[in-house]
Image (cartoon, rainbow, N blue to C red):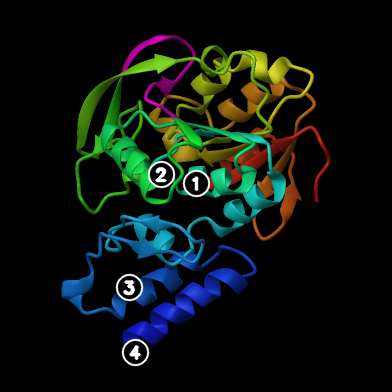
C-alpha cells in the first residue's frame, strides 16, 4: 500500500509541478519504494499523460515517462505551441513519447513525421504507436537525418541500464556501443513541399548536420519553430563547439529568437559563453515573440 501511495503521489505531482526541475528525483523515490524484484515492469504502463507504454522503470528515461515526469517543461510547451491540424516533426523520436503527445495534439487533420534510425528504439516506437491507436497518425522514417543522403553508423549504448536515447552517429568516449549501419537523409528532401509548424530535434550531437540538411525549411517564408536539445558533451563528442548548432541555425534564419525552456521561457543571448555554461538544456527558436 505504501508503494501504491508513493507512486500515486508521483503521478499527481506531474500534473501540478511548476517545472521539471527535480522530477527525476521524485520518480526515483517512487521506484525505490518498490520491492527490488518489481523494479522491472515492462508492459502496459499507463502514464499520467494518457499513453500506454512498454517501459523498464529501472532505466532512464523510462522511469520518468512512467510517472509523467519526463521533460515536463518541454512536454507542456509542445502542447501549448501545437494546434489541431498542425505539422510536427520529431527528429530523434526515440520510443515515441513526444511523437505521440504531438499526434494527439494535432489530431486527425494534422501531420506527424518521426525520424528514428536506431532499430531497437524504432521497433519500440512502432509498437507504442500501435498500442495507442496512432499508427495511422504518424509517418515513421528509418534514415538518420544529416546534411546528405548516404550511409552512416549509429552507435547505441551496449548496457541495459544506459539511456537508450543516447544513440548517436558519433562515438561517446568510454561508452561501449552496438553499431548499426543506417541510411542518412536530408530533412529538406524527405519533407519536400511541407511547412512544419514545429520541429523537435534531439540527435545527440548531430544537430549541426541536421540543420545543414534543412536549409530550405529554414529559409522559407514561414520557418518552423524548433525545440532543440543543447548538449555540450554530445556536441564535443561529435567534434563541434558548444555554439555550433545554434550558430548554424541563426546563420540560416537570422530572425530566430532563442529561448531557454524551463518553467517559463527565458529569452537568452546566443553567445558562446552563455551556451558553454549550459551543459544540457532544451532551447526554443521562434521568429514569433513568445512569453
Figure quadrant of residue 89? top right
Residue designated by label 1? 100
Crowd band around label 2 with a 10 angstrom C-alpha radius: few (<14), some (14–19), many (20+): many
Q: Distance of mark 4 from mark 1, alpha carbons? A: 31 Å
Residue 122's place in the image compared with 142, above or below, is: below
Mark closest to the chain's N terminus, 3 or 4: 4
Q: Nearer the viewer, mark 4 or mark 2?
A: 2
Foreground of the two, 146 or 237:
146
Whether residue 143 is in magenta: the answer is: yes
Q: Is residue 124 left or right of residue 8?
A: left
Tag 3, which secondary structure?
A: helix
Please give the residue where the numbered disc 2 appears in the rendered image: 129
On the image, the x and y values in percent for residue 137 come to 51, 37
Direction from residue 147 to residue 155 in the image, left or right = left
Indicate which disc residue 31 carries. Answer: 3
The structure residue drawn at horizontal position 80% and vertical position 26%, both measured from the top left corner, is 255
Numbered mark located on residue 2 in the image: 4
Disc 2 vs disc 1: Cβ atoms closer than 8 Å?
yes
* Residue drawn at x 44%, y 15% as measured from the top left: 185
Nearer the observer: mark 3 or 4; the answer is 4
Q: Mark 3, mark 2: which one is toward the viewer?
A: 2
Q: Residues within 10 Å of mark 1 (few under 14, many from 20)?
A: many
| Mark 3 and mark 2: Cα distance apart in space | 25 Å
Circles 4, 2 touching at the beta carbon (< 8 Å) = no
The disc, 1 or 3, on the residue closer to the chain's N-terminal end is: 3
Residue 12: image location, x then y, percent: 52, 76
Amino acid at each position: 500500500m505504501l508503494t501504491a501511495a508513493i507512486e500515486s503521489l508521483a503521478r499527481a505531482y506531474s500534473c501540478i509541478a511548476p517545472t521539471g526541475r527535480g522530477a527525476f528525483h521524485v520518480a526515483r523515490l517512487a521506484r525505490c519504494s518498490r520491492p527490488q524484484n518489481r523494479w522491472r515492469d515492462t508492459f502496459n504502463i499507463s502514464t499520467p499523460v494518457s499513453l500506454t507504454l512498454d517501459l523498464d522503470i529501472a532505466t532512464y528515461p523510462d522511469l520518468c515517462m512512467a510517472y509523467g515526469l519526463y521533460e515536463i517543461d518541454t512536454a507542456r510547451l509542445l502542447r501549448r505551441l501545437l494546434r489541431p491540424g498542425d505539422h510536427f516533426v520529431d527528429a530523434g523520436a526515440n520510443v515515441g513519447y513526444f511523437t505521440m503527445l504531438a499526434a494527439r495534439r494535432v489530431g486527425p487533420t494534422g501531420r506527424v513525421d518521426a525520424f528514428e534510425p536506431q532499430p531497437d528504439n524504432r521497433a519500440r516506437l512502432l509498437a507504442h504507436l500501435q498500442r495507442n491507436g496512432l499508427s495511422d497518425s504518424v509517418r515513421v522514417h528509418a534514415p538518420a537525418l544529416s546534411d546528405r543522403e548516404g550511409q552512416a553508423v549509429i552507435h547505441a549504448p551496449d548496457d541495459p541500464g544506459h539511456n537508450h536515447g543516447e544513440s548517436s552517429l558519433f562515438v561517446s568516449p568510454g561508452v561501449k556501443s552496438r553499431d548499426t549501419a543506417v541510411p542518412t537523409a536530408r530533412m529538406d528532401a524527405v519533407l519536400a513541399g511541407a511547412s512544419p509548424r514545429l520541429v523537435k530535434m534531439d540527435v545527440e550531437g548531430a544537430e549541426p548536420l541536421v540543420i545543414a540538411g534543412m536549409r530550405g525549411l529554414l529559409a522559407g517564408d514561414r520557418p518552423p519553430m524548433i525545440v532543440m536539445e543543447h548538449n555540450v558533451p554530445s556536441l564535443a563528442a561529435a567534434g563541434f563547439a558548444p555554439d555550433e548548432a545554434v550558430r548554424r541555425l541563426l546563420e540560416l534564419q537570422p530572425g530566430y529568437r532563442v529561448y531557454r525552456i524551463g518553467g517559463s521561457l527565458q529569452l537568452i543571448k546566443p553567445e558562446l559563453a552563455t551556451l558553454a555554461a549550459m551543459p544540457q538544456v532544451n532551447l526554443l527558436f521562434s521568429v514569433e515573440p513568445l512569453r
